[in-house]
C-alpha cells in the first residue's frame, strides 16, 4: 500500500529519482512554500543572482546529467527565464521549469494579484510556445499523473517542460494511491527492419561514406554506440559546432567540425564529396551549416533524428531514433580498410613569446595544449565559440556551447550548472566581455558553492563579432571596459589576473591549474579587431544578409 | 508631394515626433541595419549591459516622457525583455518594443536560422500576450499604416506594443506616398453628460467625499486637472503605492497613501468611512489595496479609469477617461469649507546619532528631509518600496516604483531611463542588495552617459522581505555579501561609500549632494531583520497566504 504524498513532495521525489540533485532559481512569495520543501528534501536549492542565470545553469545541468530543473516565482520570475527556456528548446536540453503561482482560492475573484500580467493563464500560454508539454497542477485528482506526463515528455523529446504550481496546492495530498506507469515508445519492427536494410545496402554500396554525428547522439546517450559503429565499420566521422565533442577529437577516425564553406576545407570536401552521408542526430541549422554554405545532397544521405528518419527522399514513420542508431551498430555493414589518418596531429610544444601581446589565434593554440579529461570547456557566443571550434577536444573532455540558439551570456551560469552536475570536472569558460557583462557576476554563486571554474575573458572592449560582421566601427558596439580582474575583490573570493602578454597568460594559467580551491578570472586583452579566421569567414557571409 | 521614405526611417521619424530621443537596447545581427539607422538619425541608441535593463529603462523613460522604446534582436534579445514588457503592461507604461528578425527572403525555406525557437511567429505570439498591439512589418504596402496603428494603440492604452522588423524590410520604401491619419476617440456626449450629472449629484449630496487619485492620472497627464478639481472643491485626496506622487504630498488637501489595513490608520478611516469615494485612474490590485484588506463600498463609489467608468453598480460605455476627469473639473460641484489640515507636519530637524548603526526607520526619516524638486525617487521592491511609501514627496518631486507588478531589479535601470528622459532630475534610487545583484551593474551605462544617480543600497545580506514574510530563516534567502561600494573601482568611475552608522550616512549623503559630476553608491549596512513597520504589517498578511 502506497503512502499518501503531497503534490509538492511527489514532484520532488520524481525529480530526484531522475537524477536531479540541485534545483536552480530564486525564491519569491508564490513559491516559498515549495522552496521550503526543497530545503527540507535531499535536494539542494541553488539560488542564483538572477533568474535567467538559473535557466542557463539548469540547461547545462541537463546537458551533463540528462535532466535539469529551475524553480521560480510567478511572472517576474517565470518570464525572466523565457529566453533560457527557449534556448533549451532550440538546442534540445530537457529542463523542467517549475513556477509558483497564485493559489486557486486566490484566483476565484479574478483579482489583480501582484505579478499578474493579463490573465492567470498568460504565463502558461507563453510557455506553451517554448516547451513540449505544460501543466497547471490545479487539481489533486490529476496532478500526479500530470507530473508523470510532462516529465516523460521532457525525457522523450529532450526539451523543456512547464509545471505551474499554485501555492495552495503544494501540500495537497493525492485522494487515491498514485501509481507511476512508465510509458515506453517502441519502434514498429517491420519499419525498422526495412529502414536498416536499405541503409545497410546504401552504405555497403558506397565508396566514400562519412558519418556526421551531431548533438542528439549526446542527448540520447549514444556516444558509445557511435564509437562502436565507427570502429566496427571504419567509416570516418565528423561533427558540427553544436555536436562538437560528441566523439573524442583525437580518435583516429575523427576528421573535424563540418561548417560548410566557412569551415575547414578538407572536412568540407570529405563531407560534400561523400557518396553516402550518414547524418545522426543532426540539426540542419544555419550556424551549424556555415550560414547556408553547406552543399549536402539528399539523394546520397541517410538522415536520422528523434524527429524523423529519412533515407534519400523518403521518410520512415514509427521508428525510434535510438533503435535506428543501435540497429546500425549491429547491422551487417562491411568493415573497410582503416583509412590513413590524414596528417596526424603532432603534439607540438607551444613556444611562448613572453612579451608578445595575446592574439586570438595563438591563444586558442596554447589553450589546446592544456585541455585534458578533467575539464569541461564551455564557450560563449562570438569568437569564444568560433575560435573554440578549432580546439582539439581530447579524450573525453566535454565541450558545449549554445551554438545554434547563440544566446550571449550563457557560459558563466552554464559553468555553475555543469560543475554541480559533474563535480570532478573543472569548467574552462571562454567568454567575451559583452557576454560577461550580461551574466558574469554569477561567479558569486559559484563562490558560494566553492566551485573553481577558470574563466578566460577575451576582452576586446565591445561586441567584437558585430564589428567584423558590419565591417565598420559603430559606437553601439563599444562597451565600458570594466576592470574584470578586480571582481574577486567585490565578491570576496576567487583570483583575478590582468593579462596582456603571452607570458602573463602562461603564468596566470599555471596559477589557475595549480590551484583547485579558487575560481580564476583572467581579463585577457585582445586587440579591438583581432578575430579568428573562422569569424572572418562567417562575418563575410553574414555581412551580405544584414 | 511627400518624399518616399523607408520603413526603418519612417518608424524612427514617428518615434521622434512623439518625443522619443533615446532608444534602449543591445544590437544583434538581425537588427544591425536598423541600429545603424538609429545612429545616423537624431536619436541616440543607449546600449545597456543586458536586454532586460533596456526594457526597464524604456519603461521608466515612458513614465517620465509619455513614450519609450527598446530595440533588440530576435528571440535571444526579444525574449529577454518579456519580463520588463510584462511589467510595463501591468502598470500601464507605453513602451514600443522593436525587434529585429530574419529577413522575409531568409524565411522562405523555413530554415533553422540561428536564434529561432519554434516557428518564425513564436516571438510575436508570445508578445501578443504582453502587449496591446503587435505587428510584423513584412509588407511595404501595409507597413506604414501598421506603424501608425500600433503607436496609436500604445498612446491610447498606455501599454506596450510589439513591432517586428524583418531585416530585409528595413530599407524598403513605401510604394505610394503615405499620409498619417490621426485617429481620435471621442466620448458619446450624451453618455458623458449623464455620467457627469449623476457624479455631481452624488458628490454634492455627500458629506465626506474623498478623491483617491492613482497612476492613470499620471499616465494621461491629468495632474493639473486633478489639482484644479481638488482646489476648486476642497475635497481631500489620497493616493496609492502605485500612484504615489501624483499630487505634491505637501499639498494642504493631501492625506497620504491608502493601503487598506496595512497602511496608515487615519488614511484608512478617511477613505473607508467616506460616503462618496471618487476613484480616478485607480488599479484595484492587491499590493495597492493592502493585500486585500481594503474595505471599499461600491455603493458609495465613483470609479473612473481608461478601461471603465462605474458609478455605484452601473457602468457607462463610450466615455473617454480624460473627458470624464476634465468634465468633473468644470462641473458644478459645490465648494466645501477648507478642512483643517490634521496636525500639519513640522519640518523637524533630523538629529543624527553619529555612532548609531543605521536603522530603516530613521533612514527613511532622514531621507525625507533631503528630498527636493530636483530629484526623482525610484524605489525597488521589498522594504525599499514599503519604507519609501512613508516618504513625503515634496513639491513636484517625482516618485515611482513597480508597486503592482513588483519585479525586483527595476530601479537601477529605471534610473538610467528616467535621467535620460529628464536630465535635470537627479535619481535617488532605493534598492535592496538582492535586487541590486540582478541589475545594479547597469551603473556601467550610467557612467558611460555621465549620469549621476545616488544609489542607496539597503544591505541586509539577502531577500529580507522574504525572511519577514516567512517568519523564519532559510538559507535560500541569503545571498553573498558583495563589497558593493567597491564597484566604482571596477567600472572606472563613480564613488562608493561603506556606511554603517548614521554619521557615515550623513557624510556620504553630504558628499553625494555636493558632487553632481559622479554617480554615488552607498552600501548601507542594515540589520538582517530590520524592517519597516509597513513590511511587518504586510508580511503578516502574506504569511497567511504562502
Image (cartoon, coloured by chain):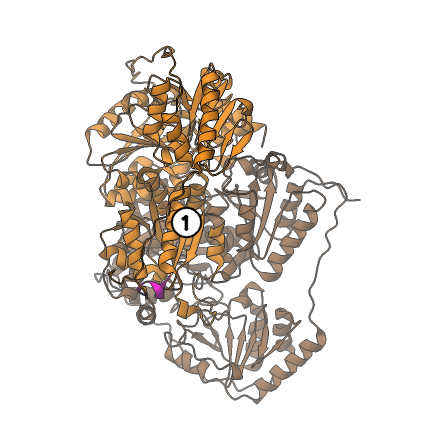
Chain colours: A brown, B orange
Residue B526 in the image: above or below residue A15? above
Looking at the picture, does residue B480 appear above or below residue A315? above
Residue B416 in the image: above or below residue B16: above
Do we see residue B529 in this rendering?
A: no
Q: Identify the image quadrant of the N terminus of chain B.
A: bottom left
Residue at the (37%, 79%) spot, across then down? A265
Q: Residue at x 29, y 16 (%)?
A: B352
- Can residue A165 be seen from the camera position used here? yes
Which quadrant of the view contains residue B104? bottom left
Image point (51%, 51%), residue name: A58
Residue A449 point in image, percent of width and height: 47, 44
Q: Is residue B62 above or below residue A293?
A: above
**Is A347 one of the magenta-colored residues?**
no
Task: Check the image and name the residue furthest to the front.
Answer: B190
Splitting the image into 4 quarters, where does residue B228 fall? top left
Query: Where does the image place residue A295, in percent across and percent down from the top left?
Result: 43, 80
Which residue is outermost to the right?
A1
The x and y percentages for residue A437 are 34, 49
Residue at mark 1: B161
The stretch of residues the image draws in magenta is B166-173
Chain to which mark 1 belongs: B
Amino acid at each position: 500500500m502506497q503512502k499518501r504524498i503531497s503534490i509538492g513532495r511527489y514532484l520532488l521525489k520524481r525529480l530526484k529519482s531522475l537524477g536531479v540533485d540541485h534545483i536552480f532559481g530564486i525564491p519569491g512569495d508564490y513559491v516559498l512554500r515549495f522552496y521550503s520543501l526543497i530545503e527540507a528534501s535531499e535536494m539542494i536549492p541553488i539560488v542564483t543572482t538572477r533568474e535567467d542565470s538559473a535557466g542557463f545553469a539548469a540547461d547545462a545541468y541537463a546537458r551533463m546529467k540528462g535532466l535539469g530543473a529551475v524553480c521560480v516565482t510567478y511572472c517576474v520570475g517565470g518570464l525572466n527565464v523565457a529566453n533560457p527556456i527557449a534556448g533549451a528548446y532550440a538546442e534540445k536540453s530537457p529542463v523542467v521549469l517549475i513556477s509558483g503561482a497564485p493559489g486557486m482560492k486566490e484566483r476565484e475573484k479574478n483579482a489583480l494579484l501582484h505579478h499578474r500580467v493579463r490573465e492567470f493563464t498568460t504565463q502558461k500560454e507563453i510557455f506553451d510556445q517554448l516547451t513540449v508539454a505544460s501543466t497547471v497542477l490545479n487539481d489533486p485528482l490529476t496532478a500526479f499523473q500530470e507530473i508523470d506526463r510532462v516529465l516523460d515528455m521532457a525525457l522523450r523529446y529532450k526539451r523543456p517542460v512547464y509545471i505551474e504550481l499554485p501555492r495552495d496546492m503544494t501540500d495537497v495530498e493525492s485522494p487515491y494511491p498514485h501509481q507511476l506507469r512508465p510509458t515506453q515508445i517502441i519502434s514498429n519492427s517491420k519499419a525498422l527492419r526495412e529502414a536498416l536494410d536499405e541503409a545497410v545496402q546504401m552504405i555497403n554500396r558506397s565508396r566514400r561514406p562519412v558519418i556526421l554525428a551531431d548533438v542528439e547522439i549526446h542527448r540520447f546517450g549514444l556516444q558509445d554506440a557511435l564509437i562502436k559503429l565507427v570502429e566496427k565499420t571504419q567509416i570516418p566521422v565528423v561533427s558540427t559546432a553544436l555536436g562538437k565533442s560528441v566523439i573524442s577529437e583525437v580518435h583516429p577516425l575523427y576528421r573535424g567540425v563540418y561548417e560548410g564553406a566557412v569551415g575547414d576545407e578538407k572536412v568540407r570536401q570529405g563531407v560534400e564529396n561523400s557518396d553516402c552521408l550518414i547524418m545522426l542526430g543532426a540539426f540542419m541549422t544555419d550556424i551549424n551549416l556555415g550560414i547556408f554554405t553547406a552543399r549536402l545532397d539528399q539523394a546520397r544521405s541517410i538522415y536520422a533524428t528523434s524527429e524523423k528518419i529519412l533515407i534519400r527522399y523518403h521518410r520512415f514513420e514509427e521508428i525510434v531514433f535510438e533503435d535506428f542508431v543501435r540497429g546500425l551498430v549491429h547491422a551487417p555493414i562491411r568493415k573497410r580498410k582503416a583509412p590513413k589518418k590524414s596528417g596526424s596531429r603532432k603534439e607540438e610544444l607551444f613556444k611562448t613569446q613572453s612579451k608578445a601581446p595575446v592574439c586570438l589565434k595563438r591563444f586558442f593554440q596554447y589553450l589546446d595544449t592544456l585541455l585534458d579529461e578533467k575539464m569541461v570547456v564551455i564557450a560563449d557566443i562570438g569568437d569564444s565559440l568560433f575560435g573554440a571550434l578549432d580546439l582539439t577536444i581530447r579524450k573525453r573532455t566535454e565541450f558545449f556551447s549554445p551554438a545554434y540558439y547563440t544566446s550571449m551570456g550563457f557560459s558563466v551560469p552554464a559553468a555553475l550548472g555543469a560543475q554541480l552536475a559533474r563535480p570532478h570536472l573543472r569548467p574552462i569558460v571562454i567568454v567575451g566581455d559583452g557576454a560577461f557583462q550580461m551574466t558574469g557576476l554569477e561567479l558569486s554563486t559559484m563562490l558560494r558553492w566553492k566551485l573553481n571554474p577558470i574563466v578566460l575573458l577575451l576582452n576586446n572592449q565591445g561586441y567584437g563579432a558585430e564589428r567584423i560582421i558590419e565591417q565598420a566601427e559603430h559606437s553601439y558596439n563599444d562597451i565600458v571596459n570594466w576592470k574584470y580582474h578586480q571582481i574577486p575583490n567585490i565578491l570576496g573570493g576567487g583570483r583575478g589576473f590582468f593579462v596582456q602578454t603571452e607570458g602573463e597568460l602562461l603564468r596566470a594559467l599555471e596559477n589557475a591549474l595549480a590551484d583547485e580551491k579558487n575560481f580564476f578570472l583572467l581579463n585577457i586583452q585582445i586587440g579591438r579587431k583581432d578575430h579568428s579566421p573562422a569569424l572572418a569567414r562567417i562575418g563575410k557571409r553574414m555581412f551580405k544578409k544584414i
